[in-house]
Image (cartoon, helix red, strand yellow):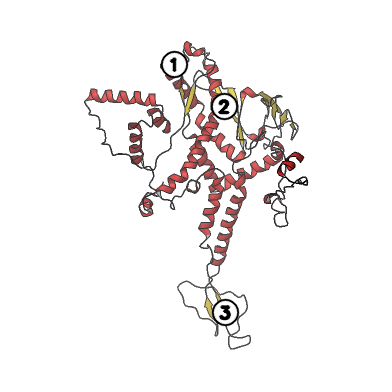
Amino acid sequence: MGWLDAILGRKGSAAPRPVSIRARYDAAQTTDANRKHWANADGLSADAAASPEIRRILRNRTRYEAANNSYAAGIVSTLANDVVGTGPRLQVLTDDPEANNAIEQAFGAWALAVNLADRLRTMRMARAHSGECFAKLVSNPALPGPVKLDLALVEADRVASPHWGALTPTEVDGIVYDPYGNPVAYRVMLEHPGDRSGNASHETLPAAKVLHYYLGTRPEQSRGIPDLVPALPLFAQLRRYTIAVLSAAETAANFAGTVETDAPANGEADPVEPMDTIELEANSLLTLPAGWKMSQVKPEQPATTYGEFKREILNEIARCLNMPFNVAAGNSSGYNYASGRLDHQTYYRAIRIDQAHMARTVLDRVLAEWFDEAKLIESLVPPRVRVLESLPHQWFWDGTEHVDPAKEATAQATRLSNNTTTLACEFAKQGKDWEAELRQRARELELMRELGIAAAPSAPGAGPASNDMADQPAEENDDEADA
């Protein structure tokens, strides 16, 4: 820098001192105020934090709450019903419409035979209260129909290593991995550890014959944690508060009243034994000792904040499931039309993501196994499709019902008329195959013409409709509160 100083006419300047920058996160500070709050924070890995013993405790407590708390039971059941509905429907996407229809009908008949929708709902409920569910792909000769593939559900407790708590790079509590982290085998106990027989024998099944349905919330997580774990303390608080309020109300109701006096001790009032009881007779007058007066016990419970407390707790409980309060509580009395629709948008998005996850981890594997077996049956799969290694397809789920079908139909007609949607998209929202629906409608119209029945005229265009009534006064929306 000497030449620069010479040009600028500066004399020798001292070298700049290095500046030390200190940055600090408040949340990383440990103080006397927050020491207890963060006492349980640790740096364990995902599998070490979810050790077999920890998962066993969480499963037992969550199952207990779901079995004894009506809110927990309703939340778990509602979630499974909304995700699975009446069951997924297959649409095959090959270039042969006749083959597509034949395969769809064959798979639909098989799905009914194995009660696929019931199995999927059970798996979704198991993920909520047990963290995960396993299913074995087995052959069941007793099934009706040519395809004998069946799903045998396995509870999470049965998948465990023979050596309790095994946690190695190649095995995590019953799941054996290859060097690339892919499951290659599952160790399944022949009997549930909760059975009285005490039989701890295992069988080792190849990963290709086992489905593992769980949601990993951390990288490198191998086993599932119940969805309701963050809400478990809240469920306990809700039950404790309800029991405390009821106990206080019962205690107050057990006492009809008290007698008291303002006279000093040894004064003019008649003597009365302390804590003595007087039995009251219904519809009668009561005389009291001189100088004494009677007062009723004031019922302090339930307090005016009782309902508000329960609503706030339920709202916090449902948040970990992306479920709105009115769905968790089964009560929409405080909602108007606009707020009901707005709260459901996040919930429906979570449901679609849940359905896509189930389709990838369960249904696609089931379809691939079914197709491999169905290809061996000449009368089931046409020869031109039998050569395919995998079956191009998509899944349809039950659509969500609109709270105002008339407004939704008007909006749908507007979208179709200005080409911002398609029939395939609109039918998919209802969980229907647009080709099958149009063919059915064509058959109906043809039969109506044969019978001389005039088709209903199209409704006159009502113009673009608003799907949101948020701009309307709340008093008008309250009439449509049962969203």
Name the residue carrying label 2: 151
CA distance separating discs 3 and 1: 92 Å
Q: Quadrant of residue 163?
A: top right
Local SS, label 2: strand
Q: Earlier in the sequence, mark 3 or mark 1?
A: 1
**Residue density around tag 1, few if under 14, some if 14–19, many if 20 or more, within 10 Å:** few
Q: Residue at x 70, y 40 (%)?
A: 49
Query: Could you tell me residue 16's position as x and y percent?
Result: 75, 45
Q: On the rendered structure, is 237 left or right of 168?
A: left
Q: Earlier in the sequence, mark 3 or mark 2?
A: 2
Please state which of residues 319 and 452 is positioned toward the viewer in this rendering.
319
Q: Earlier in the sequence, mark 2 or mark 1?
A: 1
Name the residue carrying label 3: 260
Local SS, label 1: loop
What's the amino acid at mark 2?
Leu
Name the residue carrying label 1: 95
Q: Quadrant of residue 64?
A: top right
Of the two numbered discs 2 and 1 in the rendering, the one whose residue sits closer to the viewer: 1
